[in-house]
Image (cartoon, helix red, strand yellow):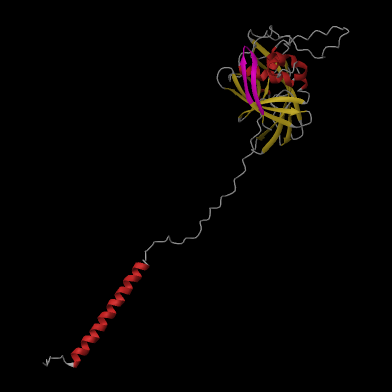
Amino acid sequence: MTTTGSRRPLWQRTWVRVTGSIAALALVAGAGAAGTALASPHTATTRPAATAPAHPKAKAPARPAAPKPTSTFGFAVGQTVTIHGTDDNEHPTTFTVRVNSIKPWTPGPYDDPVPAGKRYITANVTYRAITGPAYPNALDWETKTPNGQTYDQPGVSGDTSLSSNTIQAGALATGDVYLQLPAETTGMLVYSNGLGEAASWAVPGSALGRSPAPAAAPAAQTATPAAPAQQAPAPAPTSPQLSNGVSVVLQFYQDLTNHDYGSAWNLGGRNLNGGVGYSAWVAGYATTASIAVTSYGTWGSGTVWTHLSAAQTDGTVKTYDGTYTVAGGMIVSAHMTQTS
């Protein structure tokens, strides 16, 4: 039996084949794209924006520290201070002031006795004009104790060439100034100009009638080796005890400047010699010409801080900072450091 079926027209058969091919191609392309996506996933990342490397800001060079002004306070007798001022027309002037000596005052035939509890002193001073005039005047001087109390000049007799004089550049004027202090308190001799206190010098204990330490007895001559030339002086209990720690420290360095090593030993040198003994301790000051306490103060009871300037015999200057502990009118310990 023959079966006859119906067939679609040619154009329809052709269209089916074309559309089938297109569909097949689409499936293949889709699968390829999917395979590529699975094989090489693309992950979006955020990168920081490129920036220029940071450059540190250039720092201005540090300014050198201003030089520390030289103190004109706490000098020893014999030292000279340079003073800057102005003349009557406000022109700059420069002159020097030197304290030559400070000694106990000797009364004249018409002077009253010194009041109880006081000591009068005579200070011999020299002015020297450098540029412009200088105006020496005895009334520019006073004394000052460590507690800040000042004392004017007593009314005593005596000639002085410092009474309202004027000297020109290159000229000198020397004369005596008469002052007072409490009997058992050392202090400072202060020079003041029109702007206030300009300089000061430590008043030595010898100017206030302080007894020197007794001299050591000479060593007996025996067959044994001779004793050292310098013997440690015995304590001087009869000397009046200074009133506070600052007074003790100032007097200690004044004694060293005066080469009165026995008195300095009794004021505390025996506690500061490091065990080397009196002779070696004194020898340690062989090259020291003078010592000035340029500034000082107290940190509580019995503790005194100081800044020192030690002039050497070769012309150099050494400076020291530190503290002293004072008890019973004597330095019992010290901690000093050389700063230059």
Q: Residue at x 78, y 21 (%)?
A: 283
In the rendering, at what x and y percent does residue 120 appear? 68, 13
Q: Quadrant of residue 7?
A: bottom left
Instruction: Please state which of residues 98 and 216 is positioned toward the viewer in this rendering.
Output: 216
Give the left or right position of residue 52, taking residue 43 as reference: right
Magenta span includes 328: yes
Residue 113 colored in magenta in the image: no
Residue 83 screen position, x and y as percent: 68, 32
Q: For residue 203, what is the image quadrant?
A: top right
Give the prevailing secondary structure in the magenta stretch.
strand
Whether residue 160 is visible: no
279 above or below 21?
A: above
Relative image position of residue 253 (x, y in whole percent): 69, 21
User: Compared with residue 221, is residue 200 higher up or lower down, i.e. above or below?
Assistant: below
Near-viewer residue (129 or 282)? 282
- Range shown magenta: 322-337
104 or 228, nearer to the observer: 228
Q: Is residue 322 visible?
A: yes
At 21% across and 88% down in the image, what residue appears? 15
